[in-house]
Image (cartoon, rainbow, N blue to C red):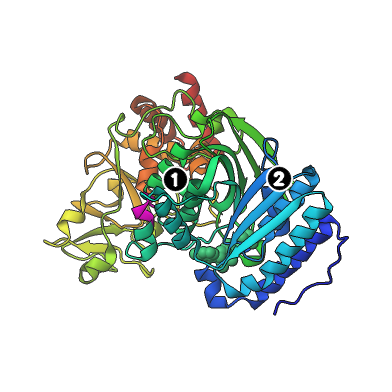
Amino acid sequence: MAVRLPQSESLGVSEFLRNTEASRKMANVMLDESNKSSLGQFMTPVCVASFMASMFDFDAQRQIRLLDPGAGVGSLTSALVARIAEFGSGFSISADAFEIDEVMRRYLPDNLQECRIQAELAGNSFEYKIFPDDFVSKSVQAISAARSLWGGELPGYTHCIMNPPYRKIPGNCHHAAGLKSIGIDAVNLYSAFMALAIELLEPGGQLVAIVPRSFCNGSYYRPFREFLLKRSAIVRMHLFASRKNAFKDDNVLQENIVVKLVKGGCQGYVLVTSSTDQSLADMSHVSFPFNQIVLPEDAEKYIHVPTDSRSDCHMYPMAVRYSLADIGIDVSTGPVVDFRHRNDLFFEPADGTVPLVYSCHFSGQRADWPKIGGKKPNAIAVNADTARWLFPMGCYVVSRRFSSKEERRRVVASLFEPELFPGFPAIGFENHLNVFHSRRRGLPRNLALGLVVYLNSSLVDACFRRFSGHTQVNATDLRLMKYPSRDALVYLGDSAESLGALSQEQIDDLLRKVIDEQ
Ligand SMILES: C[S@@+](CC[C@H](N)C(=O)[O-])C[C@H]1O[C@@H](n2cnc3c(N)ncnc32)[C@H](O)[C@@H]1O
């Protein structure tokens, strides 16, 4: 049995939400720890729930058909009912709450009952249904039935508010097969919940979701982005900039965004707001034309989340408009996967070996090799198994695939200079690095140095953060970025050559000078 706080028919709106918040905290303690991560039970604090509810429009209709999938203790529905009460009277609200977990469901009826009381106090009506079902299976069934010859009816929700579970969907599980059967290609539950909700909304219906930012980039999410952009308009995005952001009680270390979509809406400007954390104390607002959110020529359909209106931040300057292909450079993930070559690795260089470089060999803008006495090998044998994974000795640019959270910049690049490795014919780049090369050969030194300066600039960092919430930097991300012309990079390299190790200020000044001169 759920323990209730004392209730009264005359609770104020804030008291009512405080009650729901208290039951969220109680449920959090009661939850089975092992289910907590498998069911993604990171519940929304009341301040974030109220903020999400404030994003809906209610002008057009008084009949609200609300969907709350993965409802938990009902915090999001409660916040929406409170918001509507502030807005006015005469609304009739019917809510469908899906919640699979039995512990959460102990709290749900009381909280939804309280919603009914609050709605009535404001001159609105509220009725609800609780579905103790798996939202994915149930929705797939309903959508398939509606599309079949016999045409079952869909609820046609007008509003959906959600904080869905995040778990991955393995390719061989029943969820993946069901979703595929209705044309949804989702790699995890949060994108599946969003896609299903879009299907279940009526035209013009609104969805407000708090989800990880990861769907905005990465090839895995491309089908989902295409699905979303084809069926809905992005109206607003709010970014919680600190990683300990929206769910600070639960130690969730993901960058989260709140996104508002309108099904079948006409895509116009997108309002992008951001705040450091759930207090929303330092909220910034900027509107962007859609072609700065999804770049028109981007086949991957990355969704950029610009949080800053400064011109060098919300768009690459004109001088920086070239693809890597335009400037004759390729980027690849380091080809040596060390555990596949266990018997060929050496901690100290020996006859018949060539250098093997890991992230640890690049602490500054240049390489530091060998690191004797460290945890990582320094060399790899050259033989029939390894030769195809090695590059000929030359000048390369490397960037780490995994930067640490503490690192100031996401993209950290270094120069790999052959002079530091005299006498070796080849080089192994380990898999945690990205390598810039030219058809698997080295680059001219001044071009490589110019590229290092560019990649380490604040401009690249700002542009990278617009489409990625990860600390991970993939070769695909680097391939999708824009670069200065080859000549400009060479000029940048020539200018940097005489300066030695560069400070951030020097890097940014050099780049600005080159951009201004273009
Ligand atoms: C991230 S929590 C959010 C809870 C609530 N909406 C909130 O904002 O506080 C996700 C909820 O979805 C529920 N859930 C997980 N998988 C589900 C599924 N397949 N169908 C329905 N609910 C599910 C979990 O038990 C959990 O309560």
Residue 466 got which mark? none
Nearest the eye: 507 or 409 = 409
Position of 459 relative to 21 (above/below): above
Image spot of residue 228 (x, y percent) = 46, 42
365 sits left or right of 111 in the view: left
**Can residue 214 be seen by looking at this rendering?**
no
Instruction: Name the residue rendered at 21%, 66% in the picture.
Output: 350
Q: Position of residue 132 (x, y in %)?
A: 56, 68
Mark 2 C-beta closer than 8 Å to ligand 1 = no
Task: Please state the total of marks drawn on the protein image.
Answer: 2
SS under mark 2: loop
Q: In which quarter of the view is residue 7 placed?
A: bottom right
Q: Nearer the viewer, residue 316 or 516?
A: 316
Magenta range is 179-185
**Could you tell whether 418 is left or right of 319 in the image?**
left
Find disc 2 in the rendering and name its residue. Answer: 54
> Given the image, on which type of amino acid does mark 1 rest?
Asn
Residue 504, position in %: x, y? 54, 40
| Residue underneath mark 1 | 217
Residue 242: x, y in percent?
62, 52
The kind of secondary structure element at disc 1 is: loop
Q: Nearer the viewer, residue 81 or 252?
A: 81
Horizontal relation, residue 450 to residue 466: left or right: left
Please, is residue 185 above or below residue 481 in the view?
Answer: below
Q: Residue furthest left?
A: 384
At a point 49% along the width and 26% down the height, the residue shown is 317
